[in-house]
Amino acid sequence: MCRTWRIRLGFLVACLVLLSTTSHADEHNHIYDERDEVVLWMSTVGPYHNRQETYSYYSLPFCKGPKEVISHYHETLSEALEGIELKMSGIDIEFLVPVPKQKYCSVKLDATKYKDFVYAINNQYWYQMYMDDLPIWGVVGKPDDRNPDTYYIWTHKRLDIGYNGKQIIDVNLTSESKVELKPGKTIPFTYEVIWKKTNTLFKDRFDKYLDPYFFQHRIHWFSIFNSFMMVIFLVGLVSMILMRTLRKDYARYSKDEEMDDMERDLGDEYGWKQVHGDVFRPANHPILFSALIGAGYQITAVVLFVIIFAIVGELYTERGSMLSAAILLYAITSPINGYAGGSLYARMGGRVWIKQMLLSAFMLPVLVCGTAFFINFIAIYYASRAIPFGSMVAVTCICIFVILPLTLVGTVFGRNLSGTPDAPCRVNAVPRPIPEKKWFMEPMIIIMLGGILPFGSIFIEMYFIFTSFWAYKIYYVYGFMLLVFIILMIVTVCVTIVCTYFLLNAEDYRWQWTSFLAAASTAGYVYLYSFYYFFFKTKMYGLFQTTFYFGYMAIFSLALGIMCGTVGYTGTSAFVRKIYSTVKID
């Protein structure tokens, strides 16, 4: 059932954005008859210490086998964006047909080819292959342990293929026959195929790539427990504010209302009630603010749905399916963006709604694509695996012909259905002066402190996510991720409510941007953590690897910040409306 769901999801993605060039046969249904063609795809090659720095497999002077034509080929947009490039190996493999050791090609080393192989060996280059969607890794070669000027390359690929019925279950590569590299030498490459029957079920074939010890050891469970206790503490703190502190405020304000005007003027009035005429004043820069809120709603929906689909459908087992699902979901959830941003902008009295809609639709895609294309230019300079021009055109078409129209539809519905101002208090014509307050009650300080606890709730999970993306670990514990996501949302809302209460109690009504940025500052701490991870947990170096790492971490942090900021503002907005709607205002 899960397998059928994944196939249908891939089909929908292909139809929506023209992701596939062809889509039929073996690798899609994973069913083979005896002597059916089995394709060995050569994918990428790159340094072991940075799995995201990839080059085409044939950027090194490897040779192809004699087979020139295959019955099917496919590469999706998500594969192209992830740097997955499939090239036919030319090696002839048929289902259940063993192949004894035999030569499939040879390479004569000139000075250039020799230097390329030596550079790859010195930088610990690994290459990746695929067979029936199963990833296979191999090492290019190794230096001599006793003589550092001598290098060896592995020339024999032994493929042990496990099968169950008509399905391929397991593929193991053994690199053998190391040959010394010397300029002018002709190096033959050989392969061997051995078929072995296994009792492992097809649905369990990906388990060998998972590392349960890494993802489910004690520190993971401890972090969840620690975050859960933080949630209980914060919910209790907010409840205390709502039930005790606000009750005292209400009692004090009710007593003030019983005084006559002379007593009230001589009294010492203070607190959040004093800004009732300004608290619902539209935020500064309403176009940008409403666009960020709209994008935040969309990102939150996409993240939640992707996590759920990953749990139900095990998307990590399908090459590029995670990114395909994200692209599909981001496109079809565009009405959420338009509805949330458009209705908020209308309630703030905004009139330039087309400008707001365009900013809401294109703000995040432009930032993401701009960063990715900048990194892409650097990748082209370094001859790395770059995003093809056709993929850039496809992404542009998605934004113009899918995201923009759906955002327009959502904006129109949002303005007409929930775009009427409905603040419980009348807004004063002239803004009230903001009194002086202690330094720790300034909005900038609140913003800086607001992200500490939310970051603390996801700190451990960030390590696992970073390791799965930047190292050779496959992230599959999406049940943990869903739990951490829920905890993050609760902690973010609680923290921003507390921060906003203190801000309003200091008679500062600039709560909209403060609540958004206080929650969004979580992303700032994540980005700072990425510096620690880069210098102490990776072995990356050089302009390309540094730009690649910090560029994509900036995209990740930006999306996280917009999501947290939106959740924080939404919870705080409900809190503010609640406390002011229950107070009698003269």
Image: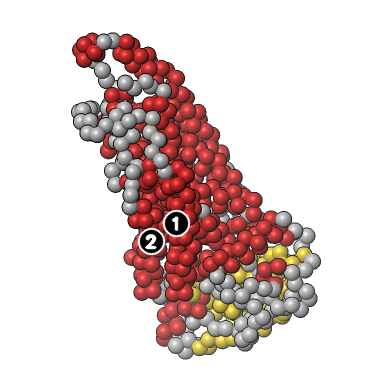
Near-viewer residue (117 or 51) = 51
Q: Position of residue 4 (x, y in %)?
A: 70, 60
Q: Decide: few, some or many residues near mark 1? Use Cα within 10 Å; few <14, some 14-19, many ≥20.
A: many
The residue shown at (30%, 32%) is 427
The residue shown at (49%, 45%) is 461
Q: Is residue 58 above or below residue 565?
A: below
Q: Quadrant of the N terminus?
A: bottom right
Residue 240 visible:
yes
The label number, if any, that marks residue 279 in the structure image: none
Q: Is residue 530 above or below residue 548?
A: above
- CA distance for labels 1 and 2: 17 Å
Dot 1: element: helix
Q: Is residue 93 above or below residue 261?
A: below
Q: The disc labelled 1 sits on which kind of residue?
A: Leu
Res 319 → quadrant: bottom right
132 left or right of 351 in image: right
Q: Position of residue 292 (x, y in %)?
A: 38, 49
Res 65 → quadrant: bottom right
Tag 2 residue: 366
Tag 1 residue: 408
Res 497 → quadrant: top left
